[in-house]
Amino acid sequence: MIVHLIPAADWPAEAVRPDPAVGFVHCSDPGSVLLPARALFAGRTDILLLEVDPALVGAPVRWEPGVPPVPGGPWFPHVYGPIPASAVVAVHELPLAGDGDFALPASLALR
């Protein structure tokens, strides 16, 4: 399972399209998703986590360093093509904890 961060206003959609600047869709796994969430969406309350089954994507999924790379940092799944809505198996809100930081939804933390 991989996850993709998306503003709630952008979902639902027919597909999540690759970032034209890099040619892929940025994704994470549950263990690393809070890193890009904090970097890109700090303080926002409208962020969703799309839970994606990579076997249903129909495009190459490659585990690579983050963009920009962090020396010794985690690798992330990059999807080299659109992620069709049919590959999204669940949608989760990304809540803010009491300290204003993101908290992984309990439904994903238990996996």
Image: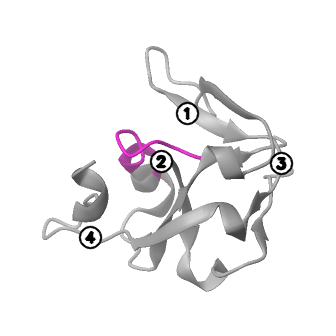
Q: Which residues are magenta?
A: 26-36
Q: Which mark is residue 36?
A: 2
Q: Residue at x 72, y 78 (%)?
A: 13
Q: Amino acid at mark 3?
A: Gly
User: Do the residues under discs 1 and 2 have CB atoms within 8 angstroms?
Assistant: yes
**Where residue 93 sits: x, y (%)?**
38, 74
Say whether residue 46 is left or right of residue 57. Answer: left
Secondary structure mainly formed by the magenta segment: loop
Estimate the spatial distance between the alpha carbons at disc 1 and disc 2, rounded to whole Å. Answer: 10 Å
Q: Quadrant of residue 32?
A: top left
Of circles 2 and 3, the one toward us is: 3
Secondary element under disc 1, as helix, strand or loop, is strand
Say whether residue 103 is left or right of residue 84. Answer: left
Of circles 3 and 4, the one toward us is: 3
Pick out the residue farthest to the left.
98
Residue ID for mark 4: 96
Q: Quadrant of residue 66?
A: top right
| Mark 2 or mark 4, earlier in chain | 2
Secondary element under disc 2, as helix, strand or loop, is helix
| Mark 3 or mark 4, earlier in chain | 3
Estimate the spatial distance between the alpha carbons at disc 2 and disc 4, rounded to whole Å. Answer: 14 Å
Q: Residue at x 38, y 46 (%)?
A: 30
Q: Amino acid at mark 4?
A: Leu
Foreground residue among 42 and 23:
23
Q: Which mark is residue 81?
A: 3
Q: Which mark is residue 76?
A: 1
| Mark 1 or mark 4, earlier in chain | 1
Pick out the residue farthest to the top.
72
Of circles 1 and 4, the one toward us is: 1
User: Do the residues under discs 2 and 3 have CB atoms within 8 angstroms?
Assistant: no
